[in-house]
């Protein structure tokens, strides 16, 4: 096994991949095992085709058993053994698990929940992101690890921390409140400006001294949403400062190091990953299926597309997923035969240049002992081990895919600040949840077969033909202008209900709704008419809708559909001005899918490859080569007409996919990857 990342490769690549091959491996925690087991690990990693492992993610106490005393003997052996075995290392800083000695000595560094109670300490991620003592200790252990291993030949990549914010995304302690005041001073300058931005005149919340600014702990009733929104922004920035501090220590010793931290794109919303991703040399993410969800493969595709978008189209790394069940859901449904391969190849199809797992060998103790692994408790005499080996073979057969790109013409506008603001209390309907709105939109486009990007509202949209803005409740002036300018230059835009309502400090844009998009849409309304739970309305096209309605007036737009019943009966429901559509209600899934196909046709977007329902077709390509991934999520054989000849079958699993003169046949639950 050769090193998969070429040390001479600059992380600031423009095209191609920082990885010379597709990475395959997982989190490796040999400190839980004896030397004999660790020797066996290397042999089995070779058998499986593993070429990259993440080491040391929770090893703080092993490396620093007491304050300032470092012990690297075990880690030396681990890294040397991996190097001898030709396995590359993604070396972690262990700062997601502060030692128990640290927590005993620094009780003020333990995070406080929104209700004001302090967390217990017998777990991981027990730290306040604003704690100076935590930051100092984290910097010290990072410096010690970097000093020792920055030129270790096994280390090809650095893994800072683990899943920032997963359990301590927002801390409400007094120290965090003090840091929040500094953050607000930098943002607003004066208390008057802060009072104005937050609308503090309401409910007599005007602040007359900076030390009156508190963390938004649970109160007798609603908090000021502008206060909560800024606390969400502040909290994301505080954790980001923890990341960049460690990243900078690594870069000081090793300027060309590839540094990442594992995000949780698509499943976690407390951090502004657009801002975070810009600080990573290679974007990486973790993704776990909700085992009981019927269409969890669509959730997976969404997360993969979002991760690629956060990476601005460059290859990314799937840092963790599972071979089988996880251990943290109410009922941990195991993946069945072929599912791990489908999951892995979906990530690969959507731009990943590496497929890694939590974890290499299943633990026998601790909180995650029932989390599946590449090597399960049963050892090598197991289905999971056999499928892990098969996956290793398939990925090695797909090495040439590394560095190829996914091309899309449709983007869903997505903004964490809009998410935070839209989901706060005191809104017209609690049934509008931002993540649901994004997911419904994505579902409809997935069902129609389109591969889509996500894009920040203020980003360069010029590569797209169509952008869709579901529930973009909060949009900055710059974002609204960017979207209008995209339209004026020939782009097509769909704006969903509850979009463009407030500015970037959550203040309502007055005049008829939707304030930010009235002119673009040539349509407006004077009130919100949310529907009762379960209530349906009908449109003049025969479509059905739910959740929301508005008495839309087509000021300068064509009426595509009207409400025929419900509180907005007779008013416009869907309008079109030039290439700008407004959809003022929640269309049923099939109606939404049909709507997007019609809009995409009108935007000049080519129809996706014809395929049976439940079959996913995604393309990656380079200038010379196209790779077509066909993933069959159904229990029936899938037949696909090939859009060009000759395609060559690279990989298929399980069973045999077959390619003939006029098409591809993929067995039930199988995958076929074609190269042209
Ligand atoms: Zn705190």
Image: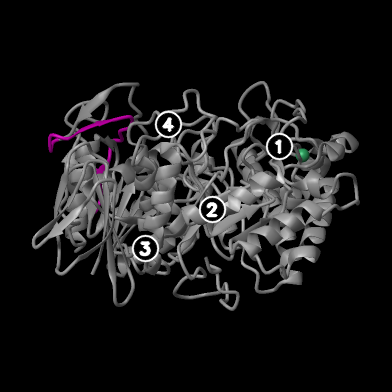
Residue 127 appears at what percent x and percent y?
76, 40
Asked which quadrant contains residue 400, the reply is bottom left
Mark 1 closeness class: few <14, some 14–19, many ≥20 residues within 10 Å: some
How far apart, in angstroms, are the residues tagged by discs 3 and 4? 26 Å
In the rendered structure, which segment of residues is drawn in magenta? 540-557
Q: Please give left or right for residue 488 compared with residue 597 in the image.
A: right
> Splitting the image into 4 quarters, where does residue 617 fall?
bottom left
**Image quadrant assignment for residue 348:** bottom left
In the rendered image, residue 544 lying in the magenta stretch gets the answer yes
Instruction: State if disc 1 and disc 2 touch (CB < 8 Å).
Output: no
From the image, state whether disc 4 or disc 2 is nearer to you. Answer: 2
SS assignment for the magenta stretch, majority: loop
- Say left or right for 649 vs 91: left
Percent across and percent down for residue 446 are 28, 47
- Any part of residue 329 in sight: yes
C-alpha gap between disc 4 and disc 1: 25 Å
Residue for badge 4: 334
Q: Is mark 1 within 8 Å of ligand 1?
A: no
Q: Nearer the viewer, residue 297 or 44?
A: 44
Q: Position of residue 389 (x, y in %)?
A: 43, 50
Question: Badge 3: how crowded within 10 Å, few (<14), some, or many (20+)?
Answer: some
Circle on res. 369: none
Alpha carbons under labels 2 and 3: distance apart: 18 Å
Instruction: Quickly name the residue at label 1.
Output: 124
State the separation of the CA atoms marked 1 and 3: 37 Å
| Pointer 2 or 1: first along the chain | 2
Query: What percent of the width, then of the height, locates residue 165?
Result: 64, 43
How far is the residue under mark 2 from the one under mark 1? 28 Å
Q: Nearer the viewer, mark 2 or mark 3?
A: 2
Query: Position of 119 compared to 8: left or right?
Result: right
């Amino acid at each position: 096994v050769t090193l998969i990342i070429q040390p001479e490769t600059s992380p600031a690549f423009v095209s191609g991949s920082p990885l010379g091959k597709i990475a395959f491996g997982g989190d490796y925690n040999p400190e839980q095992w004896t030397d004999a087991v660790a020797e066996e690990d290397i042999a089995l990693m070779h058998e499986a085709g593993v070429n990259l492992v993440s080491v040391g993610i929770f090893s703080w106490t092993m490396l620093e058993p007491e304050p300032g005393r470092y012990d690297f003997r075990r880690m030396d052996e681990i890294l040397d053994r991996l190097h001898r075995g030709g396995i590359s290392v993604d070396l972690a800083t262990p700062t997601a698990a502060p030692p128990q000695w640290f927590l005993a000595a620094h009780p003020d560094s333990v995070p406080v929940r929104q209700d004001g109670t302090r967390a217990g300490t017998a777990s991981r991620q027990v730290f306040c992101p604003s704690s100076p003592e935590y930051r100092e200790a984290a910097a010290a252990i990072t410096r010690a690890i970097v000093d020792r291993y920055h030129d270790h030949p096994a280390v090809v990549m650095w893994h800072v921390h683990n899943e920032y914010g997963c359990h301590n995304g927002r801390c409400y302690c007094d120290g965090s409140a003090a840091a929040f005041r500094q953050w607000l001073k930098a943002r607003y300058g004066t208390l008057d400006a802060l009072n104005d931005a937050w609308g503090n005149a309401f409910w007599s919340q005007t602040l007359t001294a900076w030390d009156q600014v508190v963390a938004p702990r649970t109160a007798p009733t609603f908090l000021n949403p502008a206060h909560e929104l800024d606390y969400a922004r502040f909290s994301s920035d505080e954790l980001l400062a923890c990341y960049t501090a460690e990243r900078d220590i690594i870069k000081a010793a090793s300027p060309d190091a590839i540094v990442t931290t594992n995000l949780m794109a698509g499943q976690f919303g407390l951090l502004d990953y657009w801002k975070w991703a810009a600080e990573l040399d290679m974007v990486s993410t973790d993704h776990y299926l909700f085992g009981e969800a019927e269409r969890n493969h669509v959730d997976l595709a969404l997360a993969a597309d979002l991760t690629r978008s956060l990476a601005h189209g460059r290859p990314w790394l799937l840092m963790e997923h599972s071979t089988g069940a996880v251990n943290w859901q109410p009922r941990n449904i195991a993946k069945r035969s072929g599912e791990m391969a489908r999951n892995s190849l979906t990530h690969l199809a959507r731009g990943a240049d590496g497929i890694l797992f939590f974890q290499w060998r299943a633990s026998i103790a601790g909180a995650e002992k029932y989390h599946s692994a590449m090597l399960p408790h049963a050892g090598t005499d197991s289905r999971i081990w056999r499928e892990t080996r098969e996956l290793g073979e398939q990925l090695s057969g797909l090495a040439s895919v590394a560095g190829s790109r996914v091309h899309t013409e449709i983007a869903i506008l997505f903004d964490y600040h809009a998410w935070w603001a839209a989901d706060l209390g005191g809104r017209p309907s609690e049934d509008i949840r931002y993540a649901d709105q994004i997911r419904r939109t994505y579902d409809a486009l997935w069902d129609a077969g389109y591969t889509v990007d996500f894009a920040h509202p203020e980003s360069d949209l010029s590569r797209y033909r169509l952008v869709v803005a579901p529930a973009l409740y909060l949009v900055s002036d710059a974002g609204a202008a960017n979207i209008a300018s995209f339209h004026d230059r020939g782009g097509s835009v769909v704006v969903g209900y509850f979009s463009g309502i407030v500015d970037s400090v959550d203040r309502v844009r007055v005049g008829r709704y939707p304030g930010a998009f009235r002119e673009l849409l040539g349509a407006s309304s004077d009130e919100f008419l949310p529907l009762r739970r379960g209530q349906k309305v009908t449109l003049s096209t025969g479509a059905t809708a739910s959740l929301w309605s508005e008495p839309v007036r087509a000021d300068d737009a064509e009426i595509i559909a009207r409400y025929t019943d419900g509180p907005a009966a007779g008013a416009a429901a869907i309008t079109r001005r030039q290439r700008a559509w407004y959809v003022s209600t929640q269309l049923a899934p099939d109606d939404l899918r049909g709507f997007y196909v019609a809009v995409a046709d009108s935007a000049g977007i080519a129809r996706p490859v014809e395929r049976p329902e439940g079959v996913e077709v995604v393309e990656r390509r380079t200038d010379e080569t196209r790779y077509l991934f066909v993933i069959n999520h159904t229990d029936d054989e899938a037949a696909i007409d090939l859009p060009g000849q000759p395609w060559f079958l690279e990989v298929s699993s399980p069973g045999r996919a077959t390619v003939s003169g006029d098409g591809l046949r993929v067995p039930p639950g199988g995958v076929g990857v074609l190269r042209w």
